[in-house]
Image (cartoon, helix red, strand yellow):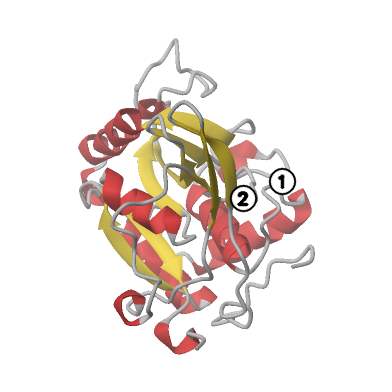
């Protein structure tokens, strides 16, 4: 789509028009090349009724979806945007599901407008994954599902072309680019609750993030164990947000299915 994220309430005009999603080229094992193209968007709650579009029992060796990126402070006003990781994560996924498969940075002013609109919709400063899904359903027109954050579920959903929205604690990610990572490791006020988008995985059990919490968060690689640690870290430090090892996916509602 063009340079504007369509954020009108209930808007799902492009949801059913779908479009090949991600492409990954790499080496699996010693020599076999992996070429993977994600399918059209599969409506949530309709997976088992669409022949050939069920979550794969054996997911591809590697999937990387070209989800566009924005930091949660696209204009650099980090002090005013300390609690907008949910908004940035939703903006990235919403834009991707509506057809932006550029994998590039979203125009900062476009991203800022999207983030500000979603902020106006938030019922609270910090949301659980289910509450983020409810917001996306009410205002963006997507169906949502909260699923167990194990390897199989994560890979299955990515193979269906669905980016994963995951709640973590920042320093639990092991990313030294976070402020205070070395001097204030996991101290309150430095390591905080956070949302990011998992956009893929490779054959070495490494997952690829679009992390809006830092300007260099585009395409950050993390091991599965480190990602689970970051989820655990959130659950222990923020029990009010604790839904266990889970992630959120968005997709068109069943009524948007195409034959």
Which residue is painted at 48% across and 18% down in the image?
Answer: 180
Which comes before the other along the chain, label 2 or label 1?
A: 2
Label 2 sits on a secondary structure element that is: loop
Whether residue 149 appears in this view of the structure is no
Q: Is residue 100 above or below residue 46?
A: above
Residue at label 2? 66
Q: Quadrant of residue 229?
A: top left
Identify which residue, 224 or 60, lies in the foreground.
Answer: 60
Q: Quadrant of the N terminus?
A: bottom right
Q: Which mark is residue 241?
A: none
Q: Is residue 229 above or below residue 149?
A: above
Q: Farthest residue to the front: give it.
A: 31
Image coordinates for residue 144, horizontal then vertical, percent: 38, 69
Identify which residue, 177 or 205, lies in the foreground.
Answer: 205
Label 1 sits on a secondary structure element that is: loop
Which residue is painted at 50% across and 39% down in the image?
Answer: 209
């Amino acid at each position: 789509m063009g340079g504007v994220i369509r954020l009108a309430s209930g808007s799902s005009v492009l949801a059913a028009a779908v479009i090949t999603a991600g492409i990954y080229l790499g080496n699996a094992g010693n020599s076999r090349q992996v070429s993977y193209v994600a399918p059209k968007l599969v409506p949530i709650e309709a997976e088992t009724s669409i022949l050939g579009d069920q979550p794969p029992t054996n997911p591809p060796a590697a999937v990387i979806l070209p989800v566009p990126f924005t930091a949660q402070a696209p204009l650099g006003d980090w002090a005013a945007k300390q609690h907008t990781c949910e908004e940035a994560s939703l903006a990235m996924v919403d834009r991707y599901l509506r057809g932006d498969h550029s994998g590039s940075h979203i125009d900062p002013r476009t991203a800022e407008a999207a983030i500000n609109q979603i902020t106006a919709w938030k019922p609270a400063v910090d949301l659980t994954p289910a509450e983020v899904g409810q917001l996306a359903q009410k205002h963006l027109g997507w169906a949502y599902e909260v699923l167990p954050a194990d390897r199989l579920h994560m890979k299955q959903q990515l193979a269906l072309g669905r980016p994963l929205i995951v709640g973590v604690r920042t320093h639990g990610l092991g990313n030294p680019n976070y402020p205070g990572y070395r001097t204030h490791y996991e101290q309150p006020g430095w390591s905080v609750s956070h949302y990011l988008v998992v956009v893929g995985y490779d054959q070495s059990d490494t997952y690829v993030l679009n992390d809006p919490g830092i300007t260099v968060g585009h395409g950050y690689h993390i091991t599965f164990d480190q990602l689970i640690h970051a989820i655990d870290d959130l659950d222990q430090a923020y029990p009010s947000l604790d839904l266990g090892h889970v992630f959120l996916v968005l997709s068109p509602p069943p009524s948007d299915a195409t034959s």
